[in-house]
Amino acid sequence: MSEGSLEAPTRHPIDWNNPDFFDSEKLDRELRRVFDICHGCRRCFNLCDSFPKLFDLIDDSETGELDSVSSDGFKPVVDACTLCDMCFMTKCPYVPPHEFNLDFPHLMLRYRAIENRDGKIPFAQKEVSKTDRNGKLAAPVSSLANWSTKTDNALTRPVMQAVAGIDKNAVLPKFHGKTFTARARKNTPTVNADAPGFGRKAVLYATCFVNYNNPDIGEAARNVLAKNGVETEVVYPQCCGMPKLEHGDIAAVAKSAEAVAAELLPWVDKGYDIIALVPSCALMLKFEWPLILPENDDIKRLSAATRDITEYVVDIAKNEGLAEGLAPAAGGVTVHLACHARAQNMGPKAADMLRLLPDTDVSVVERCSGHGGSWGMMTENFETGMKVGKPVAREALEKSAGTVVSECPLAGLHILQGMERLKAEKGEGTVPATAPHPIEVLAKAYGF
């Protein structure tokens, strides 16, 4: 037996079609096996709040070991996991191919899958995860929706907290009346035939967030790609399912994967690359879907054809070269590398892309923002998320002379809120009005 693994981590398929996956007694035995290994290691103590909760649970027990801990105490450990994958990707020495075979995030997913099967996921959380329905309902009344979700709205936010469990202090994303797909149908950017990358073709998978909450990211990506000679189409069948994965609804995710693949693969067959505009969605298409549907060849083909937007731009720069015309970003850029971008195991592509800007200092913050998708909005998690993300906010505030960006739009909102709190405490520092996606900074540097 080796102490830790020196080999690259591998991940096993999620065995959710096996009846044993939903066997509560077998789950409990696996939780105890894994938790005992984690207790003896503790390398992940400074990641999310799951590990401090686990270690406190054991340390405060009668024997100080897992044998005196009731399984009833495991739920807070599971609930604190944001499925960021950082323990698996960056910390744990016992992931496969090590014989201990630890996959902490997917074990937490298994627990939630059983909760979902048993109807134990709170109603409000399940409704929040219906991003397509919510976006379609909010778009026609976006002004009203955005008014009602403002943190200073003393009329609606306390009601939202009481009814839906969404913390009244959590900054929520805005909705847009004109979605990215609607904008794309009316405006097609002219492809630069003189660009070194001319001849490439790509489909932008819009993602629910870009489509309904921040179309500017999609337009920036499309403009940058057109400037670099890439013909683009915008396709959005439906959400990738990440919000439902958070709650253990694996069957719904599989259904989404099959539906999206059915619409995207004909474009792959026509020679188009697939680009996801948000890291969580790229992670789903590239890694999670093939683990959920390991026998589905269509999912495998789609995975192989998919790139994150920053990854794709860096690939153009490396292989053909970018089109001329980039201007410096005044004051430099502080870039937060999102957990789900890091989990794609592609390197710091957002930072690599921004370093293509001339005469621009690029600083990197490589730590969890603490948001965790819809997890960080909920009343029971919001303050924990702010605590986890405080080091990121502190570093961003210290470096915020220019632009602060995050690959994850929700993380960007969370970081700004943390920066505001620190500024209020210290009475100094500059907090930017927005934390754009890195592709928006590149678009601005091209003059868009």
Image (spheres, grey):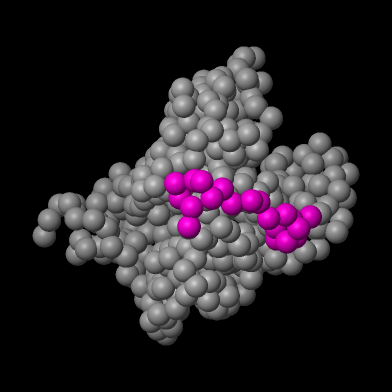
Does 437 sit above or below residue 189?
Answer: above
The residue depicted at 88 percent of the width and 50 percent of the height is 144
Compared with residue 321, is residue 122 higher up or lower down, i.e. above or below?
below
Where does the image place residue 122, in percent across and percent down from the top left? 66, 65
Residue displayed at 64% across by 71% down:
237
Confirm whether residue 192 shows in the render: yes
**Picture quarter with the N terminus:** bottom left
The image quadrant of residue 33 is bottom left
- Tell me residue 343's x, y (percent): 40, 52
Q: Main secondary structure of the magenta part?
A: loop
Which of 301/245 is in front?
301
Vertical position of residue 279 compared to residue 103: above or below:
above
Going by the picture, which residue comes out furthest to the left? 1
**Which range of residues does the magenta coloring cover?**
178-199
User: In the rendering, at what x and y percent does residue 397 appear?
Assistant: 55, 23
Residue beneath the point at 40% across and 73% down: 300
Q: Is residue 195 magenta?
A: yes
Task: Give the camera-side residue of 204 and 148.
Answer: 204
Q: Is 399 a magenta residue?
A: no
Along the horizontal axis of the image, is 300 left or right of 247?
A: left
**Where the C terminus falls, by quadrant?**
top right
Viewer can see residue 115: no
Residue 224 shown left or right of residue 288 in the figure = right
